[in-house]
Amino acid sequence: MKQFIMIMAAAVLMVACGTVQNDGLTKEERRAQTAQKVAEGLSKRHYTIEAEQCHPMRGAARRIDYGYEITVHGDTLKSNLPYFGRAYNIPYGGGKGLRFDAIIKNYEQWRTKKNMTHIVIYTDNEEDVYIYTIEVFDNGNATIDVRSREREQISFSGQMKTD
């Protein structure tokens, strides 16, 4: 009986250790597949970038919780980002901050390096005018730099969803 339990425990352990990616793709093939998904999302102007860390102008960088992201869908920008920093002239109570949906006024996109795409988005709402500068790498890593007229600049780093 003890032998049977030991054999079963060893089998369970081997199965648990064998759950590493078995999709049949090499590391290079996975990289190429991710780069293709990133390029496809950018060319269609339909992508979401999840923010994982924020870098305010004053103070240290902060890890941020799940759920903060920006989404570009055609001519619409949906921004759901936290704001830490100095505000100059904002509505009573703090206003919307960087949580709003707006029509994109101007969208510029170009490749700056072999593995990076640079995007500049101009938009506004009833509170402020914003410039989102986004750099997306072929592996899905991204940085977002937000400048506005009424608030200090803030940056975010994160990952583009490729699903």
Image (cartoon, grey):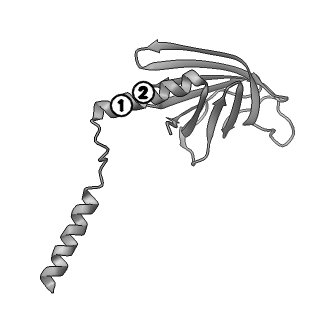
Tell me, yes or no, if residue 158 can be seen here: yes
At 48% from the left and 12% from the top, the residue drawn is: 112
Residue 14 percent location from the top left of the image = 21, 62
Answer above or below: position of 13 versus 107.
below
At 36% from the left and 28% from the top, the residue drawn is: 32
Report the residue marked by disc 2.
Answer: 35
Q: Are marks 1 and 2 in contact (CB under 8 Å)?
A: yes
| Few, some or many residues within 10 Å of mark 2 (<14, 14–19, 20+) | some
At 53% from the left and 38% from the top, the residue drawn is: 61
Kind of element beneath mark 2: helix
In the picture as drawn, the residue positioned furthest to the front comes out as 24
In this image, 158 relative to 89: left or right? left
Report the residue marked by disc 1.
Answer: 31
In this image, 124 relative to 31: left or right? right
Tag 1: residue type? Arg
In the picture as drawn, the residue positioned furthest to the bottom comes out as 1
Tag 2: residue type? Ala
Using the rendered view, name the quadrant where residue 72 is placed. top right
Residue 45 percent location from the top left of the image = 61, 25
